[in-house]
Image (tube, rainbow, N blue to C red):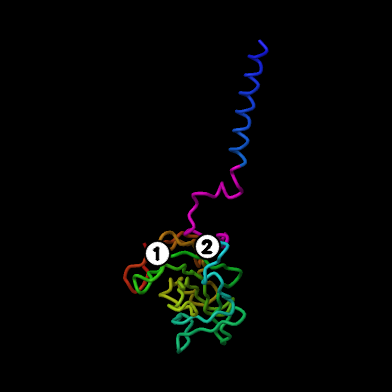
Amino acid sequence: MRDELLIGVALSLTFATGCTSSTDSLGPDAAASGSSSDSVSLTSLSAPSASASEIRQTDWANAVIDKLSFCGESDDSVEFRNGSNGFDVPCRILPDGAQPVYAEFIVEEPANAPSTEDALVLVELGNPNAARRQALVPVQLSDNGSGRYAWPVILGDDSSASGDRAMTFISYQVVGEHVEATVRNLDGSTENRRWRKYNGSGNWERY
């Protein structure tokens, strides 16, 4: 009888120990496993890895971005300082607390080049409380990794005729090679929109 009791106790301890070990192996990131690293919202950025990519180290408020013709500068190279290019009709990068989104969604050139992360940033042209327009700007590293240049932008709608109302991007994310966003329209309503690239030059179409 005593031997049977001892065997029962031993089995109970083995089961309990196994359960404890299994639970302890679940770290704080376990719940997030399976989430997409390519889908990041405006207000919820993915945590940077231990070795952050070059594009993630960009000081966006003071960045120099080539080929950004949206800002209307003659040489298409925009130099931001404290978040603005400083013109009378300013171009502002990441206005009102917007955040960059990081993902690999721009085709690498040449095709056999190592894949690198790209960025999607919000830029606004115009003065607050006046005629202004927003755009989502895909930004890629230059071949040597030292520069940043823009691909064709995703344009927001024109502001109202009087300039007192503007369409704004509330949130945006990269899903695969597509872009999804929630926007606030001129009438104050919100709408979900999606864009995809329709040619090799990186131009976008809404679908």
Q: Where in the figure is residue 33, as x and y percent of width and height? A: 52, 49
SS under mark 1 = strand
Q: Quadrant of residue 24?
A: top right
Q: Residue at x 63, y 30 (%)?
A: 16
Quadrant where the C terminus sits is bottom left
Q: Where in the figure is residue 130, as x and y percent of width and height? A: 56, 78
Residue, far left: 199
Q: Is residue 40 magenta?
A: yes
Residue situated in front as seen by the camera: 84 or 37:
37
Residue, far top: 1
Q: Where in the figure is residue 41, as x and y percent of width and height? A: 53, 60
Q: CA distance from mark 1 to mark 2?
A: 14 Å
Tag 1 near tag 2, CB within 8 Å: no
Q: Quadrant of residue 92?
A: bottom right
Q: Quadrant of residue 22?
A: top right
Residue situated in front as seen by the camera: 100 or 189:
100
Residue 195, which numbered label?
A: 1
Q: Amino acid at mark 1?
A: Trp
Q: Main secondary structure of the magenta part?
A: loop
Q: Is residue 44 magenta?
A: yes
Residue 38, which numbered label?
A: none
SS under mark 2 = strand
Q: Amino acid at mark 2?
A: Ser
Which segment is the magenta one? 25-48
Quadrant where the N terminus sits is top right
Decide: few, some or many residues near mark 1? Use Cα within 10 Å; few <14, some 14-19, many ≥20: some
